[in-house]
Amino acid sequence: MKRVGFLLKVKVDKLDEYKKHHENVWSEMLAALREAGWHNYSLFLHNNGQLFGYFETPHSLEQAQALMATQEVNTRWQEFMAPYFDANARPDEMFQELEEVFHLD
Amino acid sequence: MKRVGFLLKVKVDKLDEYKKHHENVWSEMLAALREAGWHNYSLFLHNNGQLFGYFETPHSLEQAQALMATQEVNTRWQEFMAPYFDANARPDEMFQELEEVFHLD
């Protein structure tokens, strides 16, 4: 299992809406993530819009994303989420991966 | 188990040294963290100095920190790490906790 950490930036004026949508992520989207090997996946949000993602996967971030990219539900979810982020690309194309510099089991 | 996410900022001109120290965290410090209920603890670093911490604990962040604060080795470690951070306080007094807005097991 590899532990992945990544950053994204949510628009400050859309934080409440973003949070609300994440209380009710489509069950089809959750199933697709599970099947693509996204485990123990959390998103953490700062009130300045900084979003931090953490998950565990048998794959790399690139592979885990490539597996999701084949899923039609992911295309729909990313298009749905695009207006909440500070760019025009799909959110899953803007992930900034971080380096894990310490781990304690 | 509660999942905790927090942010800190490392000085950009000290990233390499910071990383090096975290490859060899004192075993006494690791034992103190384990005993204080810091599990599956990772630190992720962006090359702009943004540091993200993730861990799982039966406690809150405040309680997990309070348990560490009683440990003499933690005082020594925080004093050792203080010069690597953008402030004068001890690093463990500058944690910015993030809100978990999504989780998939």
Image (cartoon, coloured by chain):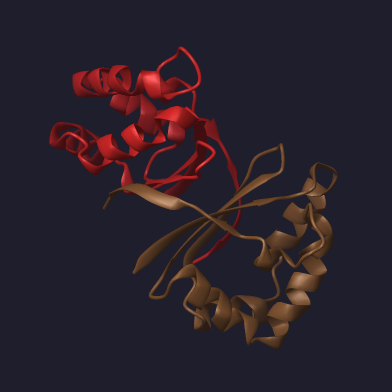
Chain colours: A brown, B red
Q: Residue at x 66, y 82 (%)?
A: A28
**Quadrant position of residue B82:** top left
Report the front residue among B87 and B62.
B87
Residue farthest toward the left in the current orientation of the protein? B27
Residue B92 lies, with reference to residue A105, above or below; the image says above
Residue A40 in the figure: left or right of residue A80: left
The image position of residue A38, as x and y in percent, is: 49, 72
Q: Residue at x 61, y 60 (%)?
A: A95
**Quadrant position of residue B58:** top left
How many discs appear? 0
Asked if residue B10 can be seen in this view, the reply is no
The image position of residue A31, as x and y in percent, is: 58, 81
Residue B71 lies, with reference to residue A24, above or below; the image says above
Asked if residue B21 can be seen in this view, the reply is yes
Residue farthest toward the top in the current orientation of the protein? B88
Q: Residue at x 65, y 40 (%)?
A: A46
Report the front residue among B85 and A37.
B85
The image position of residue B11, as x and y in percent, is: 47, 27
Q: Residue at x 44, y 37 (%)?
A: B60
Q: Quadrant of the N terminus of chain A?
A: bottom left
**Quadrant position of residue B62:** top left
